[in-house]
Amino acid sequence: MMTTDQARTAVVFPGMGPSRFTDVGKFMMIDPFVRKRLAAADEALGRSVLDGFRTAGADFGEFAQIACFINSVALADRAVETQGLAPDVCAGFSFGQKAATAFSGALPFTEAVRLTYELALCEKRFFEEEHQDLVTLTLTRVPDATLQEVLGELSERGEFHEVSGRLDEGMHMVTMREQVLESFQRRISAVGGYSLYSMKPPAHCRILSGLRARAEEEVLAKFDLADPELPVVADHDGSLVMSADQMRTLLLDTFDHPVRWHPVVDTLRGMGVTTVHVTGSDRLIHRLDVTTRAFDVVALGPEQALRPARPAARSASRTSAQPSAPSSARKEQ
């Protein structure tokens, strides 16, 4: 791993939560950085992203995904121009990999727009045919040993389950049949944990290898990725992605590899990173204990950008930031 005594900076693109026009539409219409990216995206798709986003009913539909992607990249643009951000490395958590692909130079922005759109449609088609009974639950305040005990109970009953992610101490993602979700949540509550939100369709598990294969054949094969100009840290094992082939593999790994945030933090620290800028709508990454203990964290989301007279929110390091109560959100991909 590359190490240095010089303080370095990283930009992190967060995952996607439920995204509705009523939440970010005003920001997208008035922010100059977003408007510039929107114009390019509209040209790439041959239609208005805002119109598609405004009329879409689904929180995670293709235009909601494009909007989330655009906002993350545009907020990074804003940080570069107004905050002097000059990152040495970047990382994308789950859906944030799409923004990392564009920001790192692995794909031109307009190509990354088309990639995001086509992957969203590919995923939609897949889940209309496969694994309609699965959900992925994010839970917190459950130690590893306790989680293994509860998962063992599922195994004893012959219930399918996979760990889809480890986000922080005691915070995990677990995929299971939707029919056992409520009973599993009650069991998590009984051992002192909280169920935060569930994702449907599911994500980040080995059983989705078919989706990976379909995305590779139907979508990724049409795009010529380049070596990223900025190193990218993989969100499942913390490895450095520095070639086009590695970037392609990373985009596919997100379908059938569990996400793990600790290795990303370890890699960034090993590179000498002391400050991370989290650009995009985020309720998770910039608040995690493992993040705030390791770095000075600068969060720049739409809500901060709409308050230009105030400095971007800074999360103090070495402070607790674990959610204290269940969230009503369904998904944070």
Image (cartoon, rainbow, N blue to C red):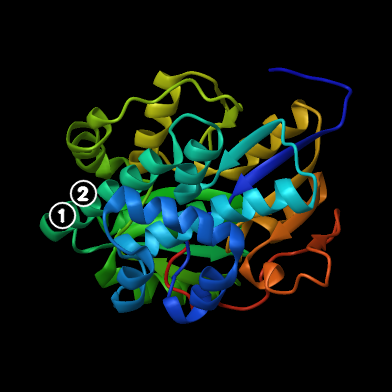
| 259 w.r.t. 156: above or below | above
Q: Position of residue 74 (x, y in %)?
A: 57, 54
Which residue is rendered at x = 38% and y = 69% of the image?
Answer: 50
Pointer 1 residue: 125
Which quadrant of the figure contains the C terminus?
A: bottom left
284 with respect to 179 (left or right): right
234 with respect to 224 (left or right): right
Q: Which of 179 and 145 is in front in this view?
A: 179
Which quadrant of the figure contains the N terminus?
A: top right
Asked whether residue 276 appears in the rendered view, the answer is yes
Q: Where is residue 132 in the image (x, y as percent from the top left)?
A: 18, 62
Which residue is rendered at x = 86% and y = 59% of the image?
Answer: 316
Q: Which of 280 and 148 is in front in this view?
A: 280
Q: Where is residue 205 in the image (x, y as percent from the top left)?
A: 35, 45
Q: Check disc 1 and report its element: helix, strand or loop.
A: helix
Pointer 2 residue: 122
| 190 w.r.t. 230: above or below | below
Which residue is rendered at x = 68% and y = 75% of the image?
Answer: 324
Instruction: Give the CA distance from mark 2 to mark 1.
Output: 5 Å
Q: Check disc 2 and report its element: helix, strand or loop.
A: helix
Q: Which amino acid does label 2 sit on?
A: Cys
Cβ–Cβ below 8 Å for labels 2 and 1? yes
Q: Nearer the viewer, residue 289 or 149?
A: 289
Q: Where is residue 221 in the image (x, y as percent from the top left)?
A: 23, 28
Asked whether residue 142 appears in the rendered view, the answer is no
Give neighbour class at mark 2: few <14, some 14-19, many 20+ (Cα, 10 Å). some
Q: What residue type is labelled 1?
A: Arg
